[in-house]
Image (cartoon, grey):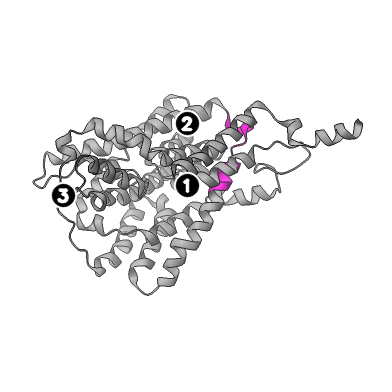
Amino acid sequence: MDRIWEFWSTTGFAWMTFPNAVMIVIGAVFIALAIIKHYEPLLLLPIGMGVIVGNIPYPPTMMLGVYDEGSVLQYIYFGVKQGVFPPLIFLGIGAMTDFSTMLSNAKLVLLGAAAQIGIFLTLIGALALGFSPQEAAAIGIIGGADGPTSIFLSSQLAPRLLGPIAIAAYSYMALVPVIQPPIMKLLTTREERLMRMPPPREVTKRERIVFPVVAFLICALIAPGAVTLLGMLFFGNLMKECGVTGRLAETARTSLIDIVTILLGFAVGASTSAEYFITTESLMIFGLGATAFAVATAGGVLFAKLMNLFLTNKINPLIGAAGVSAVPDSARIVQMVGQEEDPQNHLLMHAMAPNVAGVIGSAIAAGYLLSEMLK
């Protein structure tokens, strides 16, 4: 019996707690949503598996988790904790992004900026709930619906909240098809949703090559804190557009971003150990994140309607919802909602303009907040 008891004490069953079991169920739900509903499977599947791995209990004498000094998971988590993975993700995003739609109709950049209102309203809400300015800034970035940027900023300003912030950001990115359509329909009329827009003009190769260099200089000088993220984003785009580094661009947008996505998602999931994750602060972060995403969506749609008061060539207000940084899912949702009213109304290319502008906007917002908080 002593030997049986000794064996039992080394198993996860002996150390299992109710919070651990709850987190394991949450991980399983993430996996189910990825497989059954196809909600951001490239993100939710590794995160879900990471959540399960991170909540398998073990004796205190073992050093296995991401918070245990010298463990293998801690070394994988290093890329998240030190902000290494997000810039690499931005490199891949840049190498697969086409800024032509944004360049062809530059006024749509304003929609990407308008959607960032969710960041700053969430920051105010977090301050009101008692979070420190640094923590509130990190939480606010959830409103940009940009997982890598949320991870990057929280790793710099609020490392202890990195897990809840990252999970909240990626969860709401995955739930774009659930959250955005009701808000878009509530704030627009059927006539507005039926509006058609003329095809975007063709952008020259020279414009596409010059843009990443000029845009980086302007953005980095405005918000130096965004140098890391925007430098990698525009570098990846320059490799894609210049025509002489095809192999590098191909690697960045395929193998590299896939590897980093796997490691980042799994490490973020593994960091959600119930001991650190199931707290009142985590619940408040999730509530603020949901509010931020809804406000960002509404801000983009309402600003598009405001712009129409001054424009001769009206824009479909639905595309304002794509101002959040969930690329390209928000743009696809705009296309879907528009085609529910008119199957021949093609809004995807127009929606990609505020969508990619939102990526730049959220990175600039993060850079500004980083600069302000580290004064």
Binning the other alpha carbons within 10 Å of mark 3 as few (below 14), some (14 to 19) or many (20 upward) gives: some
Binning the other alpha carbons within 10 Å of mark 1 as few (below 14), some (14 to 19) or many (20 upward) gives: some
- What amino acid is found at the position of numbered circle 1 in the picture? Pro
Q: Where is residue 215 in the image (x, y as percent from the top left)?
A: 30, 58
Instruction: Verify CB contact (< 8 Å) between mark 3 and mark 2.
Output: no
Say which label, 3 or 2, has the lower sequence index: 3
Q: What element carries label 3?
A: loop
- Can residue 171 be found in the magenta stretch? no
| Residue at left offset 57%, top offset 47% | 266
Main SS category, magenta section: helix
Q: Nearer the viewer, mark 3 or mark 2?
A: 3
Specify whether residue 81 is in view: no
Inter-mark Cα distance, 3 to 1: 32 Å
Residue corresponding to mark 1: 41
Instruction: Using the image, tell me which numbered label, if any, was put on residue 197.
Output: 3
Q: Which of marks 3 and 1 is in front?
A: 1
Q: What element carries label 2?
A: helix
Nearest to the observer: residue 88 or residue 6 = 6
The residue range painted magenta reads 265-278
Inter-mark Cα distance, 1 to 2: 23 Å
Nearest to the observer: residue 273 or residue 348 = 348
Specify whether residue 14 is in view: yes
